[in-house]
Amino acid sequence: MRSRLVFFLGLLAAGSARAQLTPDERKLLDALDPDAVVSLTRQLSEEVGAGPSGAGYGSATAGSPAEEALADFIEGEMRARGFDVVRERFPVRAYDYGEVELLVGGGAVKAITLHSSTGTWGVRDGVEYRNGNENEGKRLRAKLVDVGEGRSTDYDRIGGVAGKVALVRRTFWPSASALEAAVRGARAVVFYDYPGENPDDALKQDGIQYHDDIPAVSISKRDAAGILKKLAEGEVEISISNRVDVSYGFSENVIGRVAGSETPDEYLAVTSHHDRWHRGAQDNAVGVAVMLELGRVLKDAGPRRTLLLIAFGAEEAGGIGTQSDWLVGSYAFVKSHPEIASRLAYAFNVDGAGFTAEKGHLFATLDNLPFQRGLLKDLNLESRIRVHEGVTNWVDAWSLGAIGGGAVSYLLWFPAHPQYESPSSFSRNYHTQLDVYRASEYQNLGVDLDLGALGLYRADRARALPIAFAELASWLSRTLEDDAIKAPSVSFAEARAAVESFGRAAESAPKAPARNRLHLNVRHELVPWLLTTSSSRAVLKTTPYASDLSALARAREAIESGDAARALSSLEEVATVDTASTLSEESYVRERLFAFGPASWGNDFEQDIRPVGPEAYGLYQRLRGGRVGADDRAAVQRLEAQARGHLEDALLLIAGKLREATARLEGKKP
């Protein structure tokens, strides 16, 4: 009944909205074929590239034959729709996973290898390795130990785990937990559960960003419950054998193009990714299918700007030597094509689509928000879909909008972050073997198709592009005001003045076709410098540093009054210090080293958040012990000075870039 109700609401919204559209727009939307999307989704998920993998049946990881098979299929579908197609290769860290053989107490347990983990045996860059103690080092046999959530305090409570296998309940990202297990001397780690609603039989896959000291595998909550029962009764022996071969390889972006009839050097794009965990019906076979259907109707309508379909490879993982190992294909595209990124009039990114839910979430780059609100109004979707400011770094829209400086939006029908209301339960199946096509779960496909098609069509037909710099200026003003309250010891005057000047220039700048190129250039050269990496919303570069400075100031005041508990709670709000409560000192230092990865897209435009110094770890541990020492005040003052310096640098950068943008809008700079 719920599914039928949601479907009915979607049809009702679409039907009542048609009166707001032009005849050409109605014709375009009427041409969309949701049934074709369903058929392609099932074919991509169930047939193309499907096969056994130790990372989960059907997984198509970066650089794998399964990913290549998907690229082959997508190329053929693009050509069948009349697109010229090229495939562009880019380097990735490529993994080949053998099936996991896991015995616990003599009984077989289903398991998968977490991505970028090592195995018990395999070949790494042409060199054989063995992590086992049986079968010529291919199989590991050891005692299993329940270490709770795998925090440093859990290990301290349990005692030594050297030479054993750690059983860990996932309550935070598994990379740090895998590292802690290795530092404590564990031979392997077995994960289960995940924050949220994963069903008891779900096998959860997520990369551990090259924390590959020891094998790491994932099992279901149901199997973990049985194992915990055995452990409560006595010792349990575990046996693991999983081959993992790793080398450098190549993934591919598949790019279809139809040249625009009037302005071929400005671009529209429909994007998705084709790599996946397990069979990935929602993440992201349906995204590829929606992309191809949108491409078909827009091509038939005769695009005036050049239309691109881009199927990105290696979205889930594949980066080389970095913790930011996802979004690899879209990052490679933006870096290889500044001529497209700088003239990206509008892109619709599809990462999951149509999931049955009463509420949706629409994310859009800041200058594109008024355009998106207009789409929702005319489609009568304002009450169903909440608009969020900015895009996040969990989808390829980040590369296009926050790295490339283009306009991009995407729609989600499931919770992507705890701060959003929970309109559905797709997170139960996310990155598990349960992400398969079920008709009852795809009742909003029509909404995704309508929103994507109408937005792209209007952007294509727009004489003056819908670039709302005034919206960007308003967001900057509000955010700087909030940050200034957090950091009263730092002057925000220059940055605020720069925003005011930019806002006036934006309001007075004429909206005319002749200004399109200027506005595209200004956005491309400005926006990436304003942002810092974020998985929740648009975040201004000053915000994390203002928050750090505020927390450190409160910690210093508490230390000066001898209140260790209040100082500790304040210090826990500082970026990276949260890991001090999770990790041992050795793990903490090693975790910080991963942030210096050379391939991280966060390194561009100073978007990675600079942490305060590692001295914070020792200060945190002393405060956790309930002590306030004579040197603690000086230590927190040094950390305060670092945070203040980071904030002042961010303010300098923002003000300078805004002044440059204002001069261009006013015609004072070429």
Image (cartoon, rainbow, N blue to C red):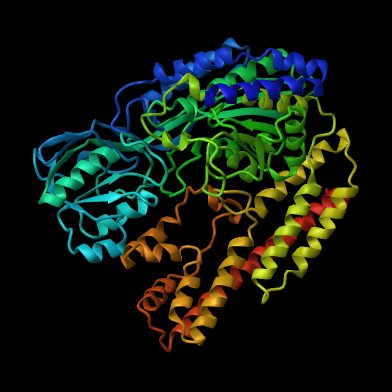
- Give 31 or 64, whichever is nearer the viewer: 31
Please give the count of numbered marks on the rendered protein. Answer: 0
Vertical comparison of 515 with 154: above or below: above
Q: Residue at x 61, y 53 (%)?
A: 605
Q: Quadrant of residue 86?
A: top right
Left or right for 559, reference 509:
left
Could one spot residue 409 in this view of the protein? yes
Vertical comparison of 510 with 580: above or below: above
Could one spot residue 444 in this view of the protein? no
Q: Residue at x 76, y 46 (%)?
A: 522
In this view, the residue farthest toward the front is: 1
In this view, the residue farthest toward the bottom is: 630
Q: Quadrant of residue 310?
A: top right
In this view, the residue farthest toward the top is: 80
- Give 389 or 647, whichever is nearer the viewer: 389
Residue 362, horizontal then vertical, whole percent: 64, 37
Q: Residue at x 80, y 42 (%)?
A: 519
Residue 339, horizontal then vertical, whole percent: 68, 35
Residue 378, horizontal then vertical, whole percent: 77, 28
- Give 527 or 544, whichever is nearer the viewer: 544
Residue 128, horizontal then vertical, whole percent: 20, 40
Vertical comparison of 144 with 487: above or below: above
Q: Residue at x 61, y 17 (%)?
A: 293
